[in-house]
Structures are given as structure tokens and as C-alpha cells.
Image (cartoon, grey):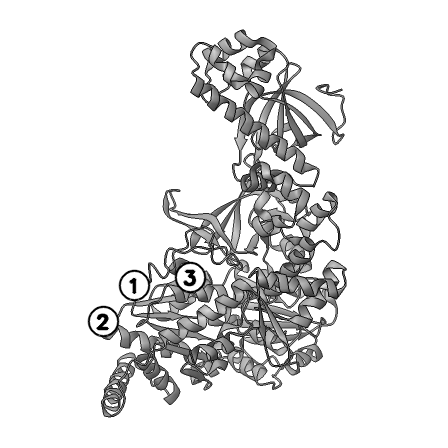
Amino acid sequence: MPGCLTDGRKKGTLETIKGYVEHIIYRNEANGYTVLVLTAEGEEVTCVGMFRGVDEGECLEAQGVYTEHALYGRQFKASAFHVTQPEDPVSMERYLRSGAVKGIGPSLASRIVKKFGTDTFRIMEEEPERLAEVRGISERIAREIGMQIEGKKDLRDAMIFLQKYGISGTLAAKIYDTYGMGLYGVLRENPYKLAEDINGIGFKRADEIAVKAGIRVDSEYRVRSGLLYVLQMASGEGHSYLPRKVILERAVELLGVPGGALEGQLENLAMDQKIILKNAEDTELVYAASFYYAEMNCARMLIDLNKVMEAEGQAASAKENRQLKKIRELEQKQGIVLDELQRQAVLESLRHGVLILSGGPGTGKTTTINTMIQYFESEGMDILLAAPTGRAAKRMTEATGYEARTIHRLLELNGGISEDNIESRARFERNAGNPLEADVVIVDEMSMVDLFLLQALLKAIVAGTRLVMMGDVDQLPSVGPGQILRDLIESRAFPTIILKKIFRQAGESDIVVNAHLINEGKSISLNNKSRDFFFLERSDVNVIYKHIVQLVQDMLPRYVQASPMDIQVLTPMRKGSLGVEALNRILQRYLNPPAPDKKEYRTGQDDLFRVGDKVMQIKNNYQLEWEIVSKYNIPVDKGIGVFNGDMGIIREINEFSSTLVVEFDEHRRVIYPFAGVEELELAYAVTIHKSQGSEYPAVVLPVLTGPRLLFNRNLLYTAVTRAKDCVTILGSSKTLQEMIDNTGENCRYTSLAQRISEAVFI
């Protein structure tokens, strides 16, 4: 029976309880998760669930199950609820006394209920002006109270309505906040608008809602939204456009409608400026409008920056001689000898506004950059250093002795949503109106920078500032859209130096030597006579598991003098016996086994997190707050933004507040609500793609079998170059050689090089 609280009921049985909210213990304002005490039939029940908008004193009818919490005892876990009207004057007065309605205190609540009795709530909802009949309530206050009551009712009605479509909690609140009472029309006419307007609702979710709303499969709204969704998914593969034939093929597969129905909507989207159609040699290219203009903007800004800083003729020659002399003096001062290409790179950085410096490991990029920095500093220039990730920035700082920041921190991410760049979802304080105050900006790991981050960076650099971009063009391209470094080099519009010579000290490392051999398509030695590069021929998956655990847990930490958490397992795949998911489950079991003092949290997708686990952020979140605290738990720094690929350790799991605390690099602590942990995954093993920009003391790489598309030279080269002191490969030498021989890469549809060529002639 509803409200029955007998101890004889079974755990896990769906039940309904009804009562009034005595006390709210905890509420997460971000997602609405609430712990409250409900008084039902004279007994107090602790309820947990998404009770957004519920206040103390209100009457609730909730559906859910009783559970037994290890720490907090018996709880009612609500899956659905609705607010009911208090049915007697006592309950009504209790609600009004609670402070749920602003402007009504205990004495006023008593007078209102005394005046209207059981009709109180009907009066407040339907005839709020009559509240002015009560002593102490003016007509203005009466109207304000009426608006409050109506607003609360509208929100609750909307959330109950949205539950029919499988929407609840945070998303329902976002929908209501976006459309207000207009949400009913949106859902009835064009649910696909949700995918355009609300972060967190993509095409697939909107499509599910549309089915329930009875929207036709060939609806104009569905086709348009589906085409935009195809372009969005393509950007996740690194594309900035799709050929017309490709987008139509993908859309037909997605939507299940004939291609003829799609053609017209492409044209309509172009007329609405949602997409850009661009003729190429033998096809038509289809861009999401923001991608096309991002490429255009980047091309124009790069051309504007690339001004020749020298006069021509004899004056230039004399100046170059003086510069060369100074460079040699700096070499002597540092105790180094630059080769011809390195000196040329330094000279080009002095002569041009833009310089591209590329090269593999051990080719002297850092030495070259350090000489540039020394030269610029001797001229009294202000220098800023940056890299795409925290780990890459830390490496840059260690290599140069100068502070390097992530590009996001350099641009002063503020956590807002950019209106002109919805793909990046980021707004920066440093922009065209508030540019960086620097004479030189040097950016490392440019292969990781995507199109929209490049655009944000260029907007913050004024003409006259030198921009030096360096990286390894043979590494994997960015996770986001574009292949910036490759396109910049292929444009041939900017001075470019590609270092190839391996210096003696680097040549002592077989990691460096083998990396270059792999890149050149040559076989590598697997005789295990190396001090830092090892191969174990193994064909049994279970044997590979055993070796990986031994290597990570015991052998490699001792060999490279590092913690097991610093040893990184890299794999080409997510799925399969040697994919990320399987390896993480095994490594978690051995590296961070369960213990009575280690709290755990299991997600709805059955993922298990435990205090002490190594985890990774798997999507950019520009609004997540972080804090650095001292050993006395005093905040010393704070900021916003946690990014795809950031790694950390789970330090705390709080079941009462339903939160999880992760400590990332540089001791940045981030609090995740349980509802937000889908942005995290275990990181004992990560894909090679996710390792970009990072360097680890030792890398373990299982290579047995897998898709040819993934098992290629580019991927192997990237994996090997992630290791600083030791690489261990386990698996098949045949597969390893096949990877070296396989030059196939995922083709990226990008056109920045073309846009640069066009901009040169404008």
C-alpha cells in the first residue's frame, strides 16, 4: 500500500510512497540529485533521487525501491515522482511555513490558511490576486507569489511531461530553461531542434524522442538534422568536410530514406547558411558552416602574421651576418653546436612572423627552440610558451627552463560557451579584443592542435608577433577536426624547417633509433640486446596478460625508477582481448585491488571506480572547476577546464554527497558528481590515440592481431615515441612487421592548405 513502511517489504520491489518533505539533507544543483527526509504516515523515510525543484514542506508521491546502504542504512531510491497538493490545512500551512514560497513566513502562512482553508492552493494558483485579502499582503506581493507558484508548477509539469519521452533530471531542466512553456510545441513539431540547441542531446536522442512524438521518418526536420549529424560525426573522425557523395551515402545509411530525399535538403541547409557547398575538381565539398569559416579565418590570420621582418638587399644581408654571429655566440655560451638546418630555423624565426619546425625524436628541436628563446630574450622580447596538453606543457617547461602553459590557460579559458564557435564550446578571455601581450609565441606538439583551437589561438595574436609552431608531422593528427601541422607544411606558404639528423646522444637510445627506422619503413632489431627497447614473442593472450601485469607491477618500476602508475600500457584498440576495456579490468584488479578501506562506485553502465584508480578524462569539459590545495588543505590556485586525455588518480568517493574527487597533474583536484563520471574511464591502459602529447617513463605495447586500418606504421611510431626510458612490446613479430609495412592511414578530409593558397592571392 502507498505509504506503508512495514519492515516486511522486500528490497528491490517497486513501491509508491506519499508524504511531505521534512528536510533536504543534500542537493547537487548541477544535476538535481537530492537526499531528503520524507514524512509518510508518521514515519521518516530517507529518499534519494533526482528531486529537482522540490522544496521542504512540499507533498510528494514517489515511485521507487527500498535499498540497504552500507553506511546510511535503509533508503528509498526514487525513479519517478510528482508533487501533490497538500490535502489538509495543517499540511498546507506546514508547506507555506517552510520558506518554499519567498515572501511568506510562519505568521503569514498561518493567516493565509486561516483565511482560505482547504481552498488555499487553488486560490494561489488560479486567483492569486485574492491573496491581497490577507492582512500583510499587498497586490504587488500577491502577484509575485502567484508568479512563483505558476513557475514551480510549470517546471514540474514539464519534467513530468518529459518523462514520457525518457527524459529526466538534468536534461529536462535544460529543456525547460531553454524553451520555457514553448517546449511542448518544439516536441510536437520539431524535436530535432533539441539537438541544435541543447548540449547533451544529440541527433540519436532527438530521434528517439521524435519516434515517440510520431514524427515521420522522411520528415524534413529529421532529414536536415540527420545531415548535420553526419557532418558532426565526421568531425569526430578529424574531417572538416565531406564530399557530397560520402555525406549522402552516410545519411542514407543513418536515416533509412532514399538519397533523392536528401539532395533537396542539402540545398535548403546551404540556403539557410547551416552548411557551405564548395566546388572542387570533380566533386562538391560539404562543410558545416563553422568549419568552413574556421579554415578561412585561420588561413587569413596566418597570412597576416607571416610578415617578413627584414628589409631586402644589402641591408638584409648585413643584418643576417650579425644574426649569424650572435647565434654562434649563443652556441658557445650554451656549449652546443647547431647544424646548418638548426641555424637556419633560428634565422627564419627572426626574419618571418610564422615559422614551422618539425622533426622526429632526437633531431634537436628542443636545442633549436632553446637557442631561439635565448636570442629573443637577449633582444628584450617577451616570450610565451604553450602546448595543447598539461603533460606536453610540463615537458616543454622541463626542456626549456621557461614556464609553458596549456593553450587553454594561455588564452585564459573562462568556461563560457562561445557563440561563434559552438564546436569547441569554449570562450577565452584572450581574443582579438584582448590579445596576448607577447613578442614571440612558441607552441609545441602542433600535431595535436585541432582547427578550432588554432582559430582561438590566432585570434589572440596580433600582427607583428612572431609565431613558432613545432611538432612531429609523422605523429597521429589531432583528436579533433583538422590535421593542422601537415596542412601548414603542405601549403608551402610559410618557412618550414624539417630536422632529420639524429644527434649522437639521441642515437644512444634504441627508442629513438627504432622510431626513425619505423618511420622510414625499415625493420627493427628484436634481439633484446638493447637497454631500452625490448620485444617478447608471445602468442597466447593469457600469457600476455600475465607478462603485462608483471611488467607494470614490479619489473619496469624498478628498472626505470618510477611508480607503477607512471608505467603506461598502450594499445591500438578499445575492444577485443587486448583492447583498452579488457586490459583496464585486469590491471585494476592487480594494481588497485578491492580493500575494506577503499570506497567504490559502480555506474549504471556497470563500470567500477575505486579510490586509488588511475583515470582519464575522455572529453573536453570547459566548465569543470579545479582547485589546487596546500598540504593544510588551503586553496592556493583554482581554474576551470579539464580536457580530453588529462590523467589523474581517484582520491575520494563520497557516497553521501554522491561525488568523486580526482587529482590530475599539477595537483589539480576536481569534484565530479556521480552523474558526471561518464566523462571518466580507467587509464591503466589507453589507446595510442589518447596518448598523444604525453611522455611516460616506460611504455608497454601489446601487439598481436587487430584491424589493418588501426595496425599501421603511423600508430606504431606514435606509441614508441611516447616512451622516455623504456619500450616493451609483447606479441607477434609478424604483426609488428606488418604494422611497419602498412602505410595506410585514415584519410582526413581537410582543406586548410587550400584555404591558405587562396588567401595568399587575395
The type of residue carrying mark 3 is Thr
Q: Which mark is residue 745?
A: none
Seen in the picture, residue 74 relative to 537 is either above or below; the reply is above
Q: Residue furthest top?
A: 114
**Mark pair 2, 1: CA separation:** 14 Å
Task: Identify residue type, mark 1.
Answer: Glu
| The C terminus sits in image quarter | bottom left
- Determine if residue 89 is in view: yes
Mark 2 vs mark 1, foreground winner is 1
Q: Quadrant of the N terminus?
A: top right
The residue that appears at 51% across and 79% down in the rendered structure is: 512
- Where residue 286 sits in the image (x, y, percent)? 60, 69
- Looking at the rendered image, the disc whose residue lies closer to the viewer, 3 or 1, is 1
Q: Residue at label 3?
A: 406
Q: Residues within 10 Å of mark 3 (few under 14, many from 20)?
A: many
Q: Earlier in the sequence, mark 3 or mark 1?
A: 3
Q: Give residue 602's quadrant in the image.
A: top right
Q: Which residue is mark 1?
A: 437
Task: Using a 10 Å C-alpha cutoff, classify the residue at mark 2 as few (fewer than 14 neighbours), some (14 to 19) or many (20 or more).
Answer: few
